[in-house]
Image (cartoon, rainbow, N blue to C red):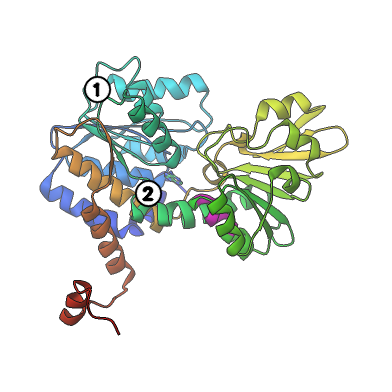
Amino acid sequence: MQGKEKLEWAMTHMDVLSEIREEFLKKRPFKGLKIGMALHVEAKTGILALTLRDGGADVRLASCNPLSTDDEVVEALRADGLNVYARKGESREEYYENLHKVLEYEPNIIIDDGGDLTTLLHGEYSHIEIMGGNEETTTGVMRLKVMEKKGVLRFPMFNVNDAKMKHLFDNRYGTGQSTLDGIMSATNLSIAGKTAVVAGYGWCGRGVAMRMRGMGANVIVTEIDAVKAIEARMDGFRVMPMIDAVKEADIIVTTTGMKDILRKEHFKEIKDGCILANSGHFDNEINKKDLEEMAKSRKRIRKYVEEFSLGDKKVYLLGDGRLINLVAGQGHPVEIMDMSFAIQALTAEYIASHNSLAPRVYPVPEEIDELVAKLKLKAMGIKIDKLTEEQKRYLEEWKEGT
Ligand code: ADE
């Protein structure tokens, strides 16, 4: 499929963002503003960039990961006059050159995914004045909170990840579906009948575990958090330390945001033939250096599958340990990114109209979450009940019992 068709297909299924785009065309909230973006450059992201441009912004877009770009979409966006700096398979140097191209242009507002753009703005680009920005993902928010705590954050950043209409759907159902999509496309193997280990029971891990079970896998969850471990257990999954889980695992998926989830000690014990995939933002959850050092040999046997021979056993690393849902899959489903990117667009509009915010990490305003929920319900053709006046009164009451 060509990039233009991919963009059209995405737009057709992004009802909420399309409605916001119509409003932006009328209101032009970003007139005279430059927006710098570092996101996974694929069709849904393209629709967000075009929406912001229709809102009057001058947009520059780079990727937030060297392997997640859809080159056909890049071509189509460029043909439409958008400044896009991304290529699938770019080297680390090219990746940073592309982020530089976004920043050299001195944006007023940024939209980041993972925190690399924000970090550069606190290093060699610390002279640029930023009105504010949005962060898309859990890993980026973790980095922002450290910056805030250390007192170095120099402009306001909105935590888009934790908006209800983002993480409850994108992280859970989005990562759940797209991770399986990536693993299945990369391997053409069955999920049914396998033991799948999911590292981390945050919203992404919950989604992956749920969908793995739905496809017929026997699922084990690993955790470091006692509450989440109990939740996983009560959701019906087995819970155990990774060192025990690797002995049974046919597939392991990391979704933690933490480095070295799989390392030497685990590779020593791992089951022969195990498939390793990561759905966390960075490629440091599976320690590739350890794998390389232990490997007697390695070879690429499918486009996104590399075999590491560890002497008496083999393991298969998918997509170089980078987010498998975007490397071998197509990213989250369109209707889900519709909600995430509606939050992004409206929060960017909020920044454009509030230009003296203190340098802190802000939650997305409640009204934005509520508006996106209402628009999505309407788009899905779902009607819900309303409280009666009597029920509203009951909410204000504390004396009335049964
Ligand atoms: N498509 C665009 N951005 C994405 C993200 N952060 N995760 C999954 N799919 C995406």
Is residue 91 covered in magenta? no
Mark 1: which secondary structure? loop
* Residue marked by disc 1: 106
Of the two numbered discs 1 and 2 on the same chain, state the one appearing first in sequence.
2
Q: Nearer the viewer, mark 1 or mark 2?
A: 1
Q: 398 or 141: nearer the eye?
A: 398
In three-dimensional space, the C-alpha distance between marks 1 and 2, rounded to whole angstroms, equals: 27 Å
Residue 344 placed where, x, y %?
Answer: 29, 45
**Residue kind at label 2, given as amino acid type:** Leu
Residue 13 placed where, x, y %?
Answer: 36, 59
Residue closest to the far left: 27
Viewer can see residue 396: yes
* Residue marked by disc 2: 7
Q: 54 or 385: nearer the eye?
A: 385
Label 1 Cα neighbours within 10 Å, binned few <14 / some 14-19 / many ≥20: some
Q: Quadrant of residue 152?
A: top left
Mark 2: which secondary structure? helix
Residue closest to the far front: 399
Q: Is mark 1 within 8 Å of ligand 1?
A: no
Residue closest to the far right: 312
Q: Is residue 169 left or right of residue 391?
A: right
**Residue kind at label 1, given as amino acid type:** Glu
Viewer can see residue 303: no
Q: Which residues are magenta?
A: 204-209
Q: Are marks 1 and 2 in contact (CB under 8 Å)?
A: no
